[in-house]
Amino acid sequence: MTYEVKSLNEECGVFGIWGHPDAAKLTYFGLHSLQHRGQEGAGILSNDQGKLKRHRDMGLLSEVFKNPANLDKLAGTGAIGHVRYATAGEASVDNIQPFLFRFHDMQFGLAHNGNLTNAESLKQELEQRGAIFSSTSDSEILAHLIRRSHNPNLMGKIKEALSLVKGGFAYLLMFEDKLIAALDPNGFRPLSIGKMTNGAVVVSSETCAFEVIGAEWIRDVKPGEIVIIDDNGIQYDSYTNDTQLAICSMEYIYFARPDSNIHGVNVHTARKRMGAQLAREFKHEADIVVGVPNSSLSAAMGFAEESGLPNEMGLIKNQYTQRTFIQPTQELREQGVRMKLSAVSGVVRGKRVVMIDDSIVRGTTSRRIVKLLKEAGATEVHVAIASPALAYPCFYGIDIQSREELIAANHTVEETCQIIGADSLTYLSIDGLIDSIGIETDAPNGGLCVAYFDGKYPTPLYDYEEEYRRSLEEKTSFYK
Ligand code: SF4
């Protein structure tokens, strides 16, 4: 059971805290605001004076901790937590994080957001050297690398391990006497640090979690950085100097909550600017703007403001579909039983509608929404997408790793327009996207990864290289 809207899912969310008597409970509230980043499983690991305890299970956070005793038993002043959506490793409780590793001389916990691109080769190498993996998730690899390092001190071991894993990662590690946060050399995934009024330090995938627990944002973790948090405060260090910011642009487009800020840019504001830029690039006549709820509403606002067209609520989302176990059969669906979205005929009837959506993945959702609007009486439906066409797979933490799944990898704009039944189809340009987000940085592409759109990956693809090359030969590209 997931909240999946269009088969484009974030891998995970992480939250950590050090120095608060209610560490596990605050982690619960922090994770609650990160639930959109993963609904498959959740877990919290606490540090009770050096003793690590954990509870994890499949399902939403509220289901995992339905029994309050499961949270009460996690005493201690430090904690890390995780909400999971699986991209690597199957759906099983063994893959739910945080992981807990106990050795005769030490113990530590681990939570990971992202996807490693050299996981397969590292795993094979480690297994040949005798490692036994207890999950099929790539997140466990770092623990083996730390443990097997011959470096004489713990920080040396962690740095060595971090320099061996490739791809997109934001890690939280809980040791007996410290909490460690680390980010990959491109900072593909977001990770921010905050402080509570009692001095407790918090780390979160998104800043929206800080608001919920009354913490103040201090700064974002930098690419290649390692942050050590203990009773003496916060210490910033790095494990590599070979860094270049390339944060995932999909965080701004679709994944992150609108109230989060990433690298100084508020997500809602960025989406509004994408909508405004899309209006400047849009070349058709229309009467009203309708955003697809929920993630496209900010872009619709920006589009309406810029174009001068009224922004109307022409589509309503049922917020409770994820709690419904009874799904309509194909027959009932044909009779008009629609679970997720309804068109408001009183709003769209007789109107030329600009339908704003944040992205098109396979095209099936867009086709359904266009049909809904037309059945409700819209005379024309012009689809305007507040991001460029998704034509390449992601290897850094999003669950689409095959070009076959992407409609834009296999069809031109005209063909896609026809398939989804729209009167026109406009995508935001890549330059328009980069300008709209507007991170203050000198890094290429405005500090963004836009590989989903242009196929130019900021890093080598390691284990995925061959598979990716093969898929390029098989399919025609949208951009060629
Ligand atoms: S390829 Fe796309 S989804 Fe993946 S990190 Fe880059 S921008 Fe994000």
Image: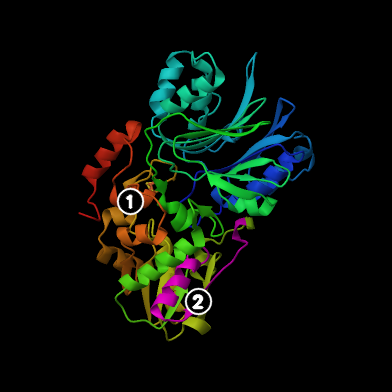
Residue 227 visible? The answer is: yes
Question: Horizontal and vertical percent for residue 463?
Answer: 34, 31
In the rendered image, the vertical position of residue 74 relative to residue 444, given as above or below? above
Of residue 440 and residue 469, the one placed in the foreground of this image is 440
Could you tell which of marks 1 and 2 lies nearer the N-terminus?
2
Let me know if residue 302 is in the magenta part.
Answer: yes
Residue type highlighted by circle 2? Gly
Viewer-side label of 1, 2 = 1
Question: Horizontal and vertical percent for residue 393?
Answer: 35, 46
Reading the image, the residue beneath label 1 is 445
**Label 1, ligand 1: CB separation under 8 Å:** no
Taking the spot 42% from the left edge, 66% from the top edge, the residue there is 273
Of residue 179 and residue 349, the one placed in the foreground of this image is 179
Reading the image, the residue beneath label 2 is 314
Going by the image, does 422 lie left or right of 191? left
**Label 2, ligand 1: CB separation under 8 Å:** no
- Quadrant in which residue 59 is drawn: top right
Question: Horizontal and vertical percent for residue 388?
Answer: 34, 59
Residue type highlighted by circle 1? Asn
Q: Which quadrant: the C terminus?
A: bottom left
Taking the spot 34% from the left edge, 54% from the top edge, the residue there is 390
Going by the image, does 82 lie left or right of 396? right
Mark 2 is surrounded, within 10 Å at the Cα level, by few (under 14), some (14 to 19) or many (20 or more) other residues, namely: many
* Dot 2: element: loop
Colour setting = rainbow
Q: Which residues are magenta?
A: 293-322
- Quadrant in which residue 106 is drawn: top right
Going by the image, does 86 lie left or right of 274? right
Question: Horizontal and vertical percent for residue 150?
Answer: 49, 13
- Quadrant in which residue 340 is drawn: bottom right
Q: Which numbered dot is residue 296?
A: none
